[in-house]
Amino acid sequence: MKVSVAEAKRILSHGGVIAIPTETVYGLAADATNPKAVEKIFRIKNRPSDNPLICHFYSFNDAKKYLAPFPVYLHKLTEQLSPGPVSYMLKLQLPSSLTVATRGREEVIIRIPKHDLLLQLLREIPFPLAAPSANTSGKFSSTNAQMIESDLGDKIDGVLDGGNSAIGLESTILDCREKNCIRILRPGAVGKDDIEWILRNEAVTVEENSAISITTPGSKYKHYSPRTPLTEVFSLSEIPSDKKNIAVLGVSEQLEKNFYKENMKLISLGSERNLQGIASTLYQKLFELDALNFDVAYFIHHDWGESAMGKALNNRISHFLMK
């Protein structure tokens, strides 16, 4: 059921759960300060109970009242990157009404999303929204209302339909708890080079591929996977020719230079020259793959490069390939 901003406000204020649009992926949202509402998110998603939820705010000023003292560089980051596809791990001011969303942890991950419809909703409600991605845990994230309906159906109280997600991959998560070091806990559209440029006059180091003991979204548990098993190959010639109903995913340049086989369904991810375009439809392509109900599928290997988006694509794709 699609809902308006006014209807979404009413549902959330009464402890309901709805799907919300963001520029990255859709979220499954509830009042982050309402324990019963937050627990509904975990039941609907079948999400592990120790996996904390990102909390969404209208502005950084709204978030500050929940935070313990934070590094001075954070003002520069939020001024340049928020609203936007970046989430920040910070220390909570305790005691806090957000600990139900953080699963009792003394740190919170906050985000100010860049989507006009969601910002309108956040401006009109007196609480932040706890919102992991709108999908059953372990599956790929939803990037439009159709995908949500297929996955979650009537388990939720409505969908605030904001069209297709523009970016298509989950936000970058930055650990900003230390005054002289930022750790990238999950790669996304904003990368190390972007952060270093913004903080070029600050004595702050930026570390990638950071491992910390705290569970963060997308780190501990299997994510982003289609139902159809995907095996990585380096060319179509590696795929057994005697099988029927085979799906093959790859960038358009790879598919165009390989010969076509009658028993293959080729799914183009888009051109390797447009990584943002590939990212924006990646999960939609996995949704299309699962709709085929094939027993087997193959993914043609590609070097995604060292850009922020390339690293984000490599991170997500590495999760759904058969090991």
Image (spheres, rainbow, N blue to C red):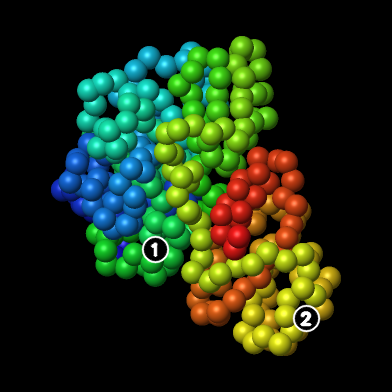
From the top left corner, tell me how far across and down residue 199 is, in percent. Answer: 61, 19
Residue 66, quarter of the rendered image: top left
**Circle 2: is it few (<14), some (14-19), or many (20+) Cα within 10 Å?**
few
From the top left corner, tell me how far across and down residue 188 is, in percent. Answer: 57, 42
Residue type for callout 2: Tyr
Residue 43, quarter of the rendered image: bottom left
The numbered disc on residue 260 is 2
Question: Which of the pair 181/33 is nearer the observer?
Answer: 181
Label pair 1/2, CB-CB below 8 angstroms:
no
Q: Secondary structure at mark 2?
A: loop
Residue type for callout 1: Ile
Question: Which of the pair 109/227 is nearer the observer?
Answer: 227
> Disc 1 or disc 2, which is closer to the eye?
2
Question: Which of the pair 138/145 is nearer the observer?
Answer: 138
User: Looking at the image, which residue is at 30% across and 46% down?
Assistant: 49
Instruction: Judge whether 234 appears above or below 258 on screen.
Output: above
Q: Is residue 97 visible?
A: yes
Dividing the image into 4 quarters, which one contains the C terminus? bottom right
Instruction: Judge whether 143 appears above or below 51 on screen.
Output: below
Question: Which of the pair 25/322 is nearer the observer?
Answer: 322
Q: Secondary structure at mark 1?
A: helix
| Residue 244 left/right relative to 171 | right
From the top left corner, tell me how far across and down residue 152 is, in percent. Answer: 34, 64
From the top left corner, tell me how far across and down residue 143 is, in percent. Answer: 48, 58
| Residue 323 left/right relative to 101 | right
User: Looking at the image, which residue is at 61% across and 27% down?
Assistant: 207
| Residue 323 left/right relative to 68 | right
CA gap, disc 1 to disc 2?
Answer: 33 Å
User: Looking at the image, which residue is at 47% across and 15% down?
Assistant: 71
Instruction: Judge whether 263 appears above or below 315 on screen.
Output: below
State the residue position of label 1.
148
